Image (cartoon, rainbow, N blue to C red):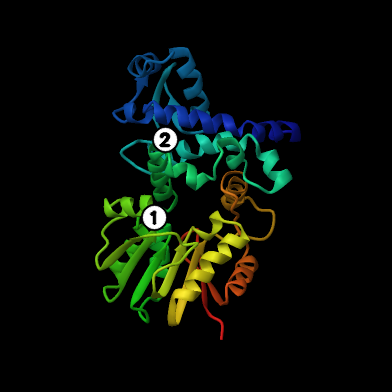
């Protein structure tokens, strides 16, 4: 069994594995290995890199199960590493995104702990989403990473809730539109509204999230107002913001909601206890990068109350995400 000091050192080296994955993704090493085992010297020639440097990075990742070294200095792709191929959009986009400008901001996590403010704003001179609006390539990568992060969650939300009582669903901050596409496919009686900033609406218009029949695409700012509807779906949006701003989003849904309407907040709830959970890591990323936070069920109930909504219930889906349902307070 490892000594405590050894385990601490391994935890401290987590960034090395993360950055090594970013390097092999950017070099398209998983793509080059898709046809089978190759010598690292050939991979280095193809990627115009130093063979010894590349070997050391790939040897590290082989120890984590991403590659397998068979003959000396020859590597093949494992099932785990295959998820990083460019023709399988998913985790690779997330790894690249989180290890770029977000990674730089995380180096100043202590600033966020001392002030409660995102280090990203201090380092880059503007909030994360404002910065992305001025950097199209990074914004496109961010959108792809969000698609990856949502894998399975959109289907889980669409399956877990009964949409039959409603007629017009508004996806607030719906981005590429994958969730709304899943909901509409299962509920042909519904019409939809995809509401997001212009970049998100543009991604949806290009089909990034799938087919959107019976849908109106509206660009706007959910801190100002949202379109009218009888069901509001707010997935992975509230966690981007502090309590004050999150309450503004929910309050605007309450103001625009038709009588008898509902608000569904789809988020991953922070579980109690000390067990490892990915959402606890993402919560600290939110602290340093966006200023948002992940929340417990009780915390979300408080947000609803502050926004003039009544928390009804939490629905656990088949994925790592829950639906928190709220209605208008009497």
Q: Quadrant of the C terminus?
A: bottom right
Give the residue pinned by disc 1.
175
Residue 178 sits in which quadrant?
bottom left
How many labels sit on residues?
2
- Where is mark 2, residue-wise? 81
Query: How would you rate the neighbour count of disc 2 (Cα within 10 Å): few for under 14, some for 14-19, many for 20 or more?
Result: many
Q: Is residue 197 left or right of residue 127?
A: left
* Image quarter of residue 127: top right
Q: Measured along the vertical axis of the image, is residue 37 above or below residue 261?
A: above
Question: In the rendered view, would you say 226 is above or below 285?
Answer: below
Disc 1 packing (10 Å; few <14; some 14–19; many ≥20): many
Q: Measure the C-alpha gap from mark 2 to mark 1.
A: 28 Å
Give the residue displayed 34% in from the left and 62% down from the top. Answer: 218
Decide if residue 315 is in sight here: no
In the rendered view of the protein, which quadrant contains the N terminus?
top right
Q: Position of residue 45 (x, y in %)?
A: 35, 14
Mark number, residue 278: none
Label 1: state its secondary structure: loop
Residue visible at 54% across and 42% down in the picture: 126
Which residue is found at the position 57% from the left and 49% from the top?
278
Residue 199, image x, y percentages: 37, 49
Front label number (2 vs 1): 1
Image height of 9 relative to 221, above or below = above
Secondary structure beneath dot 2 equals: helix
Towards the viewer: 45 or 65: 45
Residue 242 place in picture, x, y as percent: 61, 57
Q: Position of residue 252 (x, y in %)?
A: 49, 69
Q: Nearer the viewer, residue 269 or 207?
A: 207
In the rendered image, is residue 201 in sight?
yes
Left or right, 117 with respect to 29, comes to right
The single residue placed furthest to the bottom in the displayed view is 330
Q: Which mark is first along the chain, 1 or 2? A: 2
């Amino acid at each position: 069994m490892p000594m405590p000091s050894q385990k601490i050192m391994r935890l401290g080296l987590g960034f090395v594995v993360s950055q090594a994955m970013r390097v092999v993704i950017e070099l398209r090493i998983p793509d080059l290995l898709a046809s089978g085992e190759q010598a690292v010297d050939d991979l280095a020639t193809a990627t115009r890199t130093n063979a010894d440097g590349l070997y050391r990075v790939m040897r590290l990742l082989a120890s984590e199960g991403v590659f397998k070294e068979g003959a000396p200095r020859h590597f093949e792709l494992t099932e785990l590493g295959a998820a990083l191929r460019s023709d399988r959009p998913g985790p690779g986009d997330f790894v690249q995104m989180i290890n770029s400008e977000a990674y730089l901001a995380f180096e100043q996590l202590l600033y966020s702990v001392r002030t409660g403010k995102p280090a990203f704003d201090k380092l880059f001179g503007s909030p994360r989403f404002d910065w992305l609006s001025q950097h199209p390539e990074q914004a496109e990568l961010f959108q792809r990473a969000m698609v990856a992060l949502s894998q399975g969650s959109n289907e889980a939300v669409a399956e877990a809730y009964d949409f039959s009582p409603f007629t017009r669903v508004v996806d607030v901050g719906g981005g590429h539109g994958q969730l709304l596409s899943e909901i509409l496919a299962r509920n042909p009686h519904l019409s939809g509204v995809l509401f997001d900033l212009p970049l998100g609406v543009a991604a949806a218009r290009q089909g990034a999230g799938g087919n959107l029949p019976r849908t109106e695409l509206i660009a706007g700012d959910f801190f100002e107002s949202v379109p009218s509807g009888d069901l509001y779906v707010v997935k992975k949006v509230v966690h981007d913001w502090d309590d004050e701003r999150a309450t503004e989003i929910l309050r605007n849904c309450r103001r625009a909601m038709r009588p008898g309407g509902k608000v569904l907040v789809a988020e991953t709830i922070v579980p109690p206890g000390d067990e490892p959970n990915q959402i606890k890591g993402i919560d600290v990323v939110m602290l340093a990068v966006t200023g948002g936070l992940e929340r417990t069920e009780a915390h979300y109930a408080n947000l609803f109350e502050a926004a003039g909504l009544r928390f009804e219930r939490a629905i656990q889906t088949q994925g790592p995400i829950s639906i928190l349902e709220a209605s208008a307070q009497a």
